[in-house]
Amino acid sequence: MSKTIISTDKAPAAIGPYSQGVVTGNLLFTSGQLPIDPATGKIPEGSIETQAHIVFKNLAAIAEQAGTSLDNAVKTTVFLADIADFAKVNEVYAQYFNDPFPARSAFQVAALPLGADIEVEAVFEV
């Protein structure tokens, strides 16, 4: 099966040896997106809500580059530095994903790259 690498300057460049997204068959798999502003390459200061908005905008940009959208997400995984932020992230999440919502897992992790408070990866139908 062939795969197509997805890359857009509307989401942050990879900070390691990985792709922003890969399409294989009719699925797009994204790498975890940190709350990095693609214009500055930095994580802006701010609340978990601010960081979550950036993450979901980055995911949307990758999905768009692959010819799909957040509406076609089938699975998301949310990594949080503090599980106490779960409810706040849910409020932001609901602004980007619609019913029927994708399947989802959420975890507190010991640490995230660049000291981020949130990272989200997703699988989309294309």
Image (cartoon, rainbow, N blue to C red):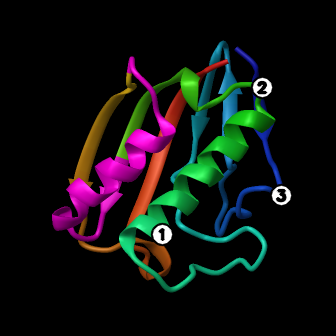
Residue 9 - label:
3
Residue neighbourhood size for the residue with mark 1, other residues' Cα within 10 Å, grouped as few (<14), some (14–19), many (≥20): some
Q: Is residue 96 above or below residue 51?
A: above
- The answer to which of marks 3 and 1 sits earlier in the sequence is 3
User: Mark 2 falls on what kind of element?
Assistant: loop
Residue 50 - label:
1
Residue 30's x, y, as percent? 58, 41
Residue 77's x, y, as percent? 37, 43
Query: What is the C-alpha distance between the residues marked 3 and 2?
Result: 15 Å
Residue 81's x, y, as percent? 28, 70
Quarter of the image with the N terminus in it: top right
Q: Residue at x 69, y 62 (%)?
A: 14
Task: Evaluate if marks 2 and 1 touch, with contact meaning CB atoms under 8 Å apart.
Answer: no
User: Which residue position holds label 2?
Assistant: 67
In magenta, the rendered stretch is 78-100
Asked whether 82 or 32 is in front, the reply is: 82
Give the number of the mark in front: 2 or 1: 1
